[in-house]
Structures are given as structure tokens and as C-alpha cells.
Image (tube, rainbow, N blue to C red):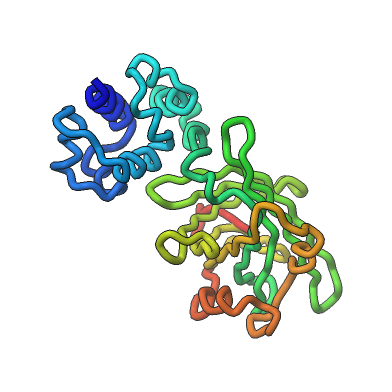
Amino acid sequence: MEHTAIATNLRLLCSTDSSISATCRQIGINRQQFNKYLSGASTPSAANLRRIALHFGVRPAELLLPPEEFEIHPTVAPRLQGMVLSRPGSRGFDSAFEGQTIPLRRYLGYYLSYFPTESWNNAIICALVRIDERDGMVHCKSVERSVDPEDGTLYLSKYHGRVAMLGNRIFVMEFQSLARDALVETVLYPVGRGQQTYLRGATFGITSRHRAPFSAPIVWRFLGSNIDLRAAMRQVGLYDKGSPSLDPRVAGLLSGATPNVAPAGASFRR
């Protein structure tokens, strides 16, 4: 009976993905074997059950629920609702951030975010980011503070946004909540398999001084879930690319890549 429930529940979840082939590629399971799970001819091993659950943002035990309970479960219903709401004129965009609490749980906490900026030559901005879970969604808050080395002008930015893991990549969408004049998109992935200390990717935004759109490589360094906020904030600011105070691993990950001016219509960052 258990394998029948899993098969029914899996077919329901797969109906929310673009295709079975894409699902198998993203999970890393052979298509022929996965078809056996869908037909009920075979039951996933404990390891594969965890991989499948992680992909769909549910708990392994929830896949064993009777189908009538599974369909209305709080972690499943938002995904199915997002399918219905994805029609033109609906709130399909919002549904991308629903059901993300399980796949992103291991990434909750504080990070220092580093990226080159075009506002100053050979400079890297370091911001403090917090990722937390509230009301069934994963939220982020960023604080960025830079002092112009030429005239001492203080540039302070605060961003609030949401986080989603889609296709094994972390997507962060933020709104500049002080000036209320910019949206930011960042795409991240772990530097090595199974680790989360360093996340790397790309960010798209607007420069602090000249308001010019640009794109840049970015690295997030995990600090922990409970940190000394004052100590962390002392690290926020503007760094020279060759500064000995800059984390050498971060410098290495950012080296050799310079910001590029984004084409018209691109997403933006500071």
C-alpha cells in the first residue's frame, strides 16, 4: 500500500514540473528507475527518497501519506496552488517563493556578501545578509555601508527580499527599502558539493554613486546562525581588491572576473 501512495504522490508532484526528464536530471536519478517509482513497480531507497523530497521541497515522510492527505498538506498545497496561479494575470511569480522552507533550511543564517563595484576603482563591497524563515517563506535582509574614500560621503543601503531554490540554484530577489528605487537579483550556488561556507554566483544591480546598471560576480561567506552582530558589521564596507583584510578565499573566487555593464532591460543591483 505504501508504494502505491508514493507513486500517486510522485505523479502529483511531477505534474508541477516541466517534464519527467527534467525532473530526473535535476534529482540525479535514472529515468528508467524513476518510471518504476511512478508506476508503483518499485519503491525508492531511503537515500533516493530524501533526494526526491529535497527536490520537491517536502519531507520524506510526507511522500508516504495517503494521497488525499498529501494533496492538502501545508507543504504540498502551495506548490499545487502555484500551478493553478501560473496562468497569465495570476500571482504565479509569488508562487516561486512558496514551499521553500525545507530545501533552503540548511542555508538559513548570516552571510558576508562580497562583490566588485564600478563606483570605485579596484574596490569590493562587503555587505551583511541574513536569511531567515517566516510565515512559510524564506526571507532575506541585507545591509550595505560604504564610505567614499575621496570625499567621505556615506552610502547606506538596506534591502529586503525573498529567496527560492529552483533547479539546484539559489535565487535572491531584493528591494532597496530605504531609497525604494531599485530591485536586485542574485543567483548563487555552493562552491563545492555538500558545503555551504562559500556560495558564488552573479548579481545584477545599480551602482551606488552613478546609478548605472552593471553585473558582477558575487561570493557569500557563511558566518553562522547565531553571531556577534557588532563584530559582523565592523567587516561591512569597502575593500581594496588587494587588501590583506579581505578573506583570501573570497579574493581568489572573485579574481580574474570584473563587473560588466549590463545590457538594457537587465536586472539591477547597487
Q: Which picture quadrant has residue 157?
A: bottom right
Position of residue 156 relative to residue 165, above or below, is below
Quarter-wise, where is residue 69 in the image? top left
Residues 58 and 25: in front is 58
As drawn, 81 above or below 188:
above
Q: Position of residue 262 (x, y in %)?
A: 52, 62
Rendered location of residue 234, percent (x, y): 79, 67
Residue extending farthest right: 152
Image quadrant in which the N terminus is located: top left
Q: Nearer the viewer, residue 113 or 84?
A: 113
Decide if residue 175 is on the left or right side of residue 105.
right
Report whether residue 85 is seen: no
In-image side of 251 versus 82 (left or right): right
Q: Nearer the viewer, residue 24 or 182?
A: 24
Residue drawn at x 57%, y 73% is 250
The residue depicted at 56 percent of the width and 66 percent of the height is: 219
